[in-house]
Image (spheres, rainbow, N blue to C red):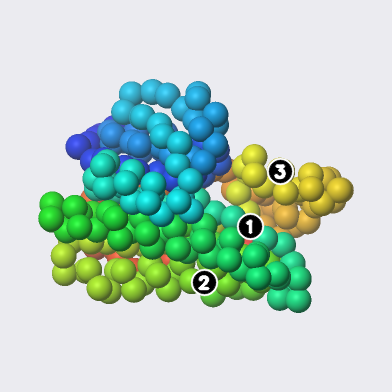
Amino acid sequence: MPHERLAGKRALVTAAGQGIGRAAAEAMAAAGATVLASDINDAALDDLTGPGITTSALDVTDSAALRGVVARFAPDILFNCAGLVHAGTVLDAADQDWAAAFAVNVTAQAVAIQAALPTMIEQGGGAIINMASVVSSVMGVPNRCVYGATKAAVIGLTKSVAADFITQGIRCNCICPGTVDSPSLHERLRATGDYEAALAGFIARQKMGRLARPAEIAGLVVYLASDESAYVTGQEFIIDGGMSL
């Protein structure tokens, strides 16, 4: 039954206040998991309620806090969803841009994995799902240098963890979406100064002619978290509406 797919599992989700993170937290709870939904913006979690869901404010760049939350919750499923998007070419990238992007997009994922692995290994296994992007080693797009570099690093991190811990019951995969309709996307579109033109441009690069819905990505998260994907590890799952074709 759908509501039993993750029964008895404990799932930790970062950046669960909106978009993919929120949809994934809700979907995993609906599939029977006990979910800890975290976000740097605790107000965004106020209306994220329901059976199986608890919430916690968490800044993933605070390594001590991140390790503490992960260690206390002891998840069977870790969904590293938090991310940061910078615009521009390599010529536009300042040192602080590289530092901020790697801190959120890569280092925080590695820290969370380090914190989760000991308990996962002790209990015989676990599922780690990292948020990458089709804008990575999969493909390049204009004006996303810093972002693409960090998301390529996530794919490398994913494969490394999968290879190192495959014999200890750990599965580690990553998701590579195209453009997803989310509040953070619309904030970036408004920041361009021409919202309608920017939105049209994002839609145009999706060959299906539309943006992804967060729930469509969440369905893949549930699959990768469940025993249905028990033979899957070290893979990047492209879910991009044909963007990379």
Verify CB contact (< 8 Å) between mark 2 and mark 3.
Answer: no
> Disc 2 to disc 3, how far (Cα)?
24 Å
Q: Quadrant of residue 30?
A: top left
| Residue labelled with disc 1 | 85
Q: Secondary structure at mark 3?
A: helix
Q: Specify the farthest residue to the front.
A: 64
> Which residue occupies 24% across, 58% down?
117
Q: Nearer the viewer, residue 83 or 56?
A: 56
Give the mark toward the camera: 3 or 1. 1
Q: Secondary structure at mark 2?
A: helix
What number of labels is visible?
Answer: 3
User: Label 2 to label 1, Cα distance in Å?
Assistant: 13 Å
Tell me what residue is drawn at x 35 percent, y 37 percent: 36
Q: Which residue is mark 2?
A: 152
How would you rate the neighbour count of disc 2 (Cα within 10 Å): few for under 14, some for 14-19, many for 20 or more?
many
Specify few, some or many for label 3: CA neighbours under 10 Å numbering under 14, 14-19, or 20 or more.
few
Amino acid type at circle 2 is: Ala
CA–CA distance in space, label 3 to label 1: 13 Å
**Disc 1 marks which amino acid?**
Val
Residue 185 screen position, x and y as percent: 67, 47
Q: Earlier in the sequence, mark 2 or mark 1?
A: 1
User: Where is the N terminus found, in terms of image quarters?
Assistant: top left
Position in image of residue 202 (x %, y %): 73, 55
Which residue corresponds to the image point at 26% horizontal and 47% vertical from the top-left? 71
Where 77 sits versus 6, above or below? below
User: What quarter of the picture does the C terminus occupy?
Assistant: bottom right
In the rendered structure, find residue 186 and report the number of the disc placed on it.
3
x then y, percent, for residue 150: 54, 68
